[in-house]
Image: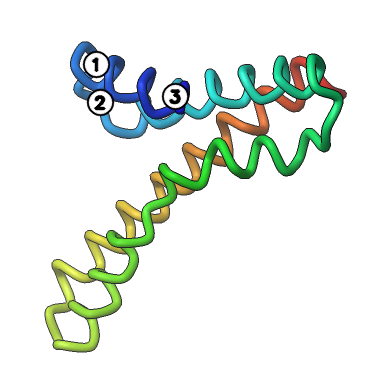
Amino acid sequence: MFLILFYLLLWNFVQVPFLSEYIGTFVGGLSGFALSLLIGENLHLIMIGAVVPLVPGIAITNAIRDLLAKHYISGSIRALEGILIAASLGAGITTVYYLFII
């Protein structure tokens, strides 16, 4: 919940889509790390649960639908956008792992 609220606040100030996903996921990873230190539960499950709401499932689904409908340009652009969003999510969580866990 903290990740989504921070992401929405950040989106109002920073209109760069991939940067806001990266920073939002980084903050979500930090809050998951802090929560795992307080509770003592499995860190990996907490971080996965924090990132799942930002996964671009609809963008990738629409990209596949466009490609199957022979709209190659819009399908390719949507697929690239979904891949870049997923990469920024992965980079945010990876940064938290390298800075605080490893």
Spot occupied by residue 17 in the image (x, y as percentages of width and height): 28, 32
Q: Is residue 25 left or right of residue 35?
A: left
Spot occupied by residue 55 in the image (x, y as percentages of width and height): 43, 50
Q: Is residue 100 left or right of residue 20?
A: right
Q: Is label 3 in a helix, a strand or a loop?
A: helix
Label drawn at residue 24:
3
Residue 41 vs 81, above or below: the answer is: above
- Distance CA(mark 3)–CA(mark 2): 12 Å
Residue behind mark 2: 16
* Quarter of the rendering containing residue 58: bottom left
Q: Is label 1 in a helix, a strand or a loop?
A: loop
Q: Which tag, 1 or 3, sits closer to the chain's start?
A: 1
Query: Residue lying furthest front in this view?
Result: 39
- Distance CA(mark 1)–CA(mark 3): 11 Å
Label drawn at residue 29:
none
Residue behind mark 1: 14
Q: Is label 2 in a helix, a strand or a loop?
A: loop
Q: Is the Cβ of the residue at disc 2 closer than 8 Å to that at disc 1?
A: yes
